[in-house]
Structures are given as structure tokens and as C-alpha cells.
Image: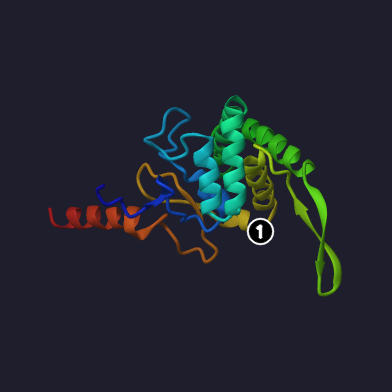
Amino acid sequence: MSALPSHLELVQGIVLPKPVGADPVLDFLNTRADWSGRGPARSEWLTGYETLVIWSGHVGLLPDATVFRLIEQASAHPTDASRRFEAALAFRADLYDVLTDTSGSAAAFERVARVIERAAGRRQLTALSNLHGVGATWELAEDLNLPLDQLAVLAGDLLTGPQRAQVRLCAGDACGWLFLDPRGRRRWCSMATCGNRSKVRAHAARTR
């Protein structure tokens, strides 16, 4: 197999984009290339429910054991898994429109809000013992909707928190990837890809 481009890596035999967004929600949006519309992407790395689950494990949202069990569930219920996967892609597109203030983002926000509210309502407060006695943590049911539920809850945190103001769009031509820019200095999703291509074009223009 030929070497992969610098922005991609092989994960459990599947080619996935490297996380560059500094936030798992933004990395979820970056699982396709070219956000010029909602039609087929130039590159789409989430090709099915299993890929979504493996990606979720890769970015640290799911432990390995949960990844394995969800893949087993999907194999036993392929129609349901496919439906949950399509819902995740629709949420991805709507959330991208919201974060980039694309035309129609008001309607997209309503759809995003419904998904986030439903996911938040599915959380259960679970007791958690610690050095100070009994604490608690929020947990989501380990079913086929878990990958989308996790992303939706995190998206709600991003939209309502201070990091919302730090979301930036890569300056690369036809890129469309998003990332957090807390210092206000970052221009590229990656210097190895869009940043380097920009430097090459600028050098070519100077030497003409």
C-alpha cells in the first residue's frame, strides 16, 4: 500500500483523517472534505456505522470494549444501524451550517437543537465513588445511538461555552475544515497540508 497523505492515518484497517480540530466535535465535522454543499463530498471518510464507531473510539469518545460491542449490535441490526448512521451524517451537516453561519443555518439550528435536547434527555446520573464519598457522573445508554448521542451532548457544550468564539475555518482553498483557535493566530487546519500548499502557491507566484 502506498504511503498515505500526511492528514490521513490507518486505524483498524480503515483510512481516517487525523484529528486536527482540537475538539472531537470539530474533528467529527472534518470527517469529510469539501463543504461546498450537501452533495457528495470530494472525500468522505465515514462510510458506514462501523466506521463511525471506530472513529469514535479513535478520538477517545468510546473505549475499545464499547466499540466492539456496538459493532456486534450493528451486525445484528443492520437496518437500525444504517438509520442511526444517516442521522449522524445529517447532524454533521446541520451542525457545520450552524458553526459556519451558512445560508439556512436558522433551520439547521432547530434541527441541531432537537438532536442535542434528545441526547441530553437520555443521560442518566450514575453514582461514582471517590475519595470524598459518593459523587456522580453522566452516562449514556450503550446502544446504537451512543456515538451520535455523545457527539450531540458535546456539541451542546461547544455551542453554549466559551470555545464557540474560538471556532475557525481553515483558510485553505476548498478545505472547509474547522478547528479551535484560542490564541487567534492559527490559519490552517494543518501546516503539512493546507499551509504547505499555500506556501507553494505563494512561492510559485513570486517566481513567475
Q: Nearer the viewer, residue 46 or 32?
A: 46
Question: Which scheme is used to colour this image of the protein?
Answer: rainbow
User: What residue would you read off at disc 1?
Assistant: 162
**Residue located at (59% from left, 36% from top):** 88
Q: Position of residue 45 (x, y in %)?
A: 43, 40
Horizontal side of residue 9 vs 81, given as left or right: left
Q: Residues within 10 Å of mark 1 (few under 14, many from 20)?
A: few
Vertical placement of residue 124 versus 127, above or below: above
Residue 91 appears in the picture as rendered: no
Q: Secondary structure at mark 1?
A: helix
**Residue located at (60% from left, 51% from top):** 65
Residue lying furthest left: 208
Q: Position of residue 35 (x, y in %)?
A: 44, 37
Q: Position of residue 189 (x, y in %)?
A: 42, 54
Residue lying furthest bottom: 131
Q: Position of residue 97 (x, y in %)?
A: 55, 38
Horizontal side of residue 100 vs 128, given as left or right: left
Q: Quadrant of residue 176?
A: top left
Q: Nearer the viewer, residue 131 or 185?
A: 131
Horizontal side of residue 39 vs 204, given as left or right: right
Vertical placement of residue 125 versus 132, above or below: above
Residue lying furthest top: 79
Horizontal side of residue 45 vs 110, given as left or right: left
Q: Quadrant of residue 193?
A: bottom left
